[in-house]
Amino acid sequence: MKQQFRGTGVALVTPFKNKAIDFDTLGQIIDFVIEGGVDYIVSLGTTGEAITLSSEECLDVLRFTVKHTQKRVPVVAGYFGSNYTERLVSKISTYDFDGIAAIMSSSPAYSKPTQEGIYRHYMAMAEVCPVPIIIYNVPGRTSSKISAETILRLAHSSEKFIGVKEASGDVEQAMQIMKNRPDNFLVISGDDPLTLPLISVGGDGAISVIANAYPQQFSSMIRAGLEGDWATAQQLNFDLLDVHPWLYIEGNPVGVKAAMEIRGLCSKEVRIPLVELSDGNYEHLKAAMAKVPERATVA
């Protein structure tokens, strides 16, 4: 299980066309990232705009992704998160997980629960979830950081928890988890620019935004880092370094969808309350992308 999710996961975008989900383009993107070398797909995470999709649309996207992927890589569902624990438990209990390798679930947002409340929330999920769970620590969106102690408590309480996507930006916390985790518990970067530094101290890869637009380069960087080829990993990291800031300057997935439009992969269209990247930042992003070299080391 650890090897299945070690490496590069891509937090897949949901492409739109005239406000509707563009399933034809979604299929092309799935093919593109798989051919680019990603190890698994995360559907309906933050980058997939799940919060602006209806429940029916979310289910349609997830079913389509599973069917189109055809088991070429594992599919992780980011659809299972909620501020209401009992509702989430019911949602998990009634879902058909055929084709889903794991779920990724962020901690409850807005209510700012205590660490004990967060622990009980996740343990309630673990009791009913038939597939492994990746904990998603993203305090910038939930306003509630999961502490290293709570993550480790969960990891040691149930084998259902196979890893954490650490998007807190706290490298010291990530290292504390790595130091004290069970053998099969993954620490996965949730911040693309911090991925290589985290790998250097024991991290297991990333669930990436930029891999939507640059799956070959980012996957090759992670693979090189995990294999200890630091010269290659460092160069590939530097190649993309100046692109990262423009992907987040007006929020995610606004930036990466613009990058994908520049690369001819999908429209930059997002749903309100998100709006498309402004013209000035679009040009800055385009200029940064124009400097990304194509390298023979990218496989």
Image (tube, rainbow, N blue to C red):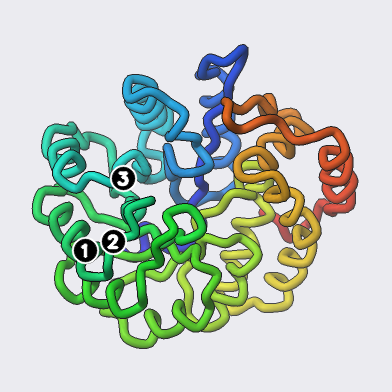
Q: Most extreme residue toward the top, as rendered?
A: 18
Rendered location of residue 125, percent (x, y): 17, 52
At horizontal 72% and vertical 49% (from top left) the residue drawn is 249
Which type of secondary structure does the marked residue at label 3 adopt?
Answer: loop
Q: Which mark is residue 117?
A: 1
* Among the two numbered marks 3 and 2 on one chain, the one whose residue lies closer to the N terminus: 3
The residue labelled by disc 2 is: 113
Q: Quadrant of residue 180?
A: bottom left
| Left or right for 187, reference 132 | right
- Vertical position of residue 212 compared to residue 112: above or below: above
- Vertical position of residue 298 compared to residue 251: above or below: below
Rendered location of residue 67, percent (x, y): 36, 26
Residue contact between numbered discs 1 and 2, judged by CB atoms under 8 Å: yes
Rendered location of residue 216, percent (x, y): 65, 50
Marks 1, 3: nearer the viewer: 1
At horizontal 28% and vertical 61% (from top left) the residue drawn is 113
